Image (cartoon, helix red, strand yellow):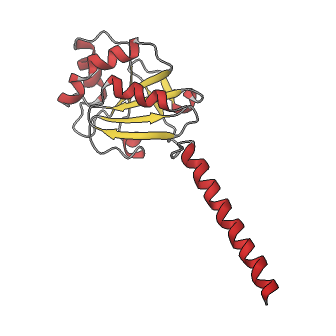
Amino acid sequence: MITMKLPFRLLILAALLLAFTSCSEALSENRGPAAPDFALPDLNGTVHHLDDYRGKKVYLLFWASWCSICLSGLNEMEELIESEEDFTVLTVVSPGTYAERNANEFKAWFSSIDHDGDFIVLLDEGGEVYGQYEMEAYPSSVWIGSDGRITERRTGHVTNYEILELMNSIR
């Protein structure tokens, strides 16, 4: 009986070591869930797929035209995009849903507001991508690593300093 207990205990110990090694490896690489792919048109009709940005870090901002916090952050977003950092900024609105204007009204409104930025605004009609990313309020932010995994989600305004700090901490 003694000889049977020792191999069994070694087997249990080996399984535990393997489990702890796998967990610590995942935690040390800061891996999150895979970011859902999408195919969304921008204001000019060009379709963007998240997979097109594979190998690059992506900052994803969900916002709405009626959201005063979102609007007050547009100038700051323009500054971030103009800084030419090593990541892509994509912004997403959901025309016709969540109290947002329909797509044509949004485009007309957006072209009439004062903004200098050349940032990408994607149209998520029906809010499917908003739901896939489990967003609950505007504005909401998602940081995606170059491996296509979500590393962070936040609701509310995030400063450029905070965006850059998180972007610099992921691969």
Query: Where, quadrant-wise, is the N terminus in this rendering?
Result: bottom right
Q: Which residue lies furthest to the top in this view?
A: 116
Q: Residue at 49% of width from left, 22% of height from top?
A: 87
The reply, left or right, for residue 79 in relation to residue 149 is left
Residue 37 in percent (x, y) is at 52, 38
Q: Which of 136 and 108 is in front in this view?
A: 136
Identify the residue at horizontal 39%, vertical 16% (top origin). Answer: 81
Look at 43% across and 21% down and name the residue there.
45
10 in relation to 63, above or below: below
Q: Can residue 122 be seen in this view?
A: no
Q: Can residue 170 be seen in this view?
A: yes
Q: As displayed, is residue 107 above or below residue 152?
A: above
Q: Is residue 127 left or right of residue 3?
A: left
Residue 78, image quadrant: top left
Q: In this view, which residue lies farthest toward the right?
A: 3
Left or right: where 78 falls relative to 20: left
Above-or-below relation of 168 to 99: above
Can you give x and y, in whole percent of width and height, for residue 69 in the image?
20, 29
* Picture mark count: 0
Name the residue rendered at 36%, 35% in the picture. 141
In the displayed image of the protein, which residue is found farthest to the front?
A: 2
Q: Quadrant of residue 44?
A: top left
Residue 51, image x, y percentages = 56, 32
Q: Position of residue 128 (x, y in %)?
A: 39, 42
The C terminus, quarter of image: top right
